[in-house]
Amino acid sequence: DAGVIQSPRHEVTEMGQEVTLRCKPISGHNSLFWYRQTMMRGLELLIYFNNNVPIDDSGMPEDRFSAKMPNASFSTLKIQPSEPRDSAVYFCASSPRQGANIQYFGAGTRLSVL
Amino acid sequence: SQQGEEDPQALSIQEGENATMNCSYKTSINNLQWYRQNSGRGLVHLILIRSNEREKHSGRLRVTLDTSKKSSSLLITASRAADTASYFCVRSGGSNYKLTFGKGTLLTVNP
């Protein structure tokens, strides 16, 4: 099993640009999570999907952030327009079923907004 | 908020020594997990202990849970340089999907 796959691993962009982060969950997992990690705030849940449906997006910081899961094997997190304070490591994680609790993380995307 | 404190924030030991990390939390939990994060990598699940369990072992890992004190500890025995990483205490309670992560303990094992 390849695990959770995220791309790109690193992204450097300029303020105001659109950024799209991608995630492929583990096959057969039906829960998907997007997190943001910073030194100041630690690991924060941004959005949770179950069976491709967004269940909890209360962690999405503002309207500049959006996430989609068009099918069971792909999800995107988009920031438009990006700002320097969005610089962080963004993780995608998947879980085999709702309530299983154990989450499997991708390697993350390190985003730098200049 | 279920966020608690991990103690210590950083720990440096010699290879072969044991490492103990502690975690406290504020609200009731369904279970508690420990995850490891190597530098520049994602988090990896290590072990889960349910609220009705007091101790659990997995290889060189030993986790304890004291729900009366709202605390847990992770013991790594016979540490190796490869154990160098950040270790996170992760609480689950209330919702059946939301995990609450602490800030982590940075463990450095010197060869």
Image (cartoon, coloured by chain):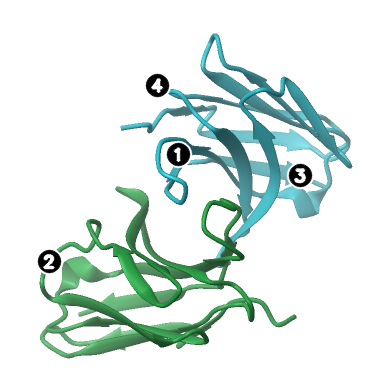
* Whether label 3 touches label 4, CB < 8 Å: no
Measuring from the top left, give residue B40's x and y in whole percent: 55, 67
- Please determine if labels 4 and 1 lie on a single subunit: yes
Q: Residues within 10 Å of mark 3 (few under 14, many from 20)?
A: some
Q: Which image quarter holds the C terminus of chain A? A: bottom left
- Residue pointed to by mark 1: B102
Report how far apart the C-alphas of labels 3 and 4 lie in the structure: 33 Å
Q: Residue at x 56, y 73 (%)?
A: A107
Identify the amino acid type marked 4: Lys
In this view, the residue in front, A38 or B33, is B33
- Residue pointed to by mark 2: A62
Q: Chain of mark 4?
A: B
* Whether label 3 touches label 2, CB < 8 Å: no
Query: Up-down: is A43 above or below A33?
Result: above
* Whether label 4 touches label 1, CB < 8 Å: no
Q: Which image quarter holds the N terminus of chain A? A: bottom right
Report how far apart the C-alphas of labels 3 and 2 lie in the structure: 43 Å
Measuring from the top left, give residue B7's x and y in whole percent: 53, 26
Query: Up-down: is B63 above or below B109?
Result: above
Identify the amino acid type marked 2: Glu
Q: Residue at x 61, y 65 (%)?
A: A96
Measuring from the top left, give residue A5's x and y in whole percent: 57, 82
- Residue pointed to by mark 3: B110
The numbered mark at residue B26 is 4
Helix, strand or loop at disc 1? loop
Identify the amino acid type marked 3: Asn
Report how far apart the C-alphas of labels 4 and 2 lie in the structure: 28 Å
Q: Nearer the viewer, mark 1 or mark 3?
A: 1
Q: Residues within 10 Å of mark 1 (few under 14, many from 20)?
A: many
Q: Colour of chain B?
A: cyan
- Please determine if labels 4 and 2 lie on a single subunit: no
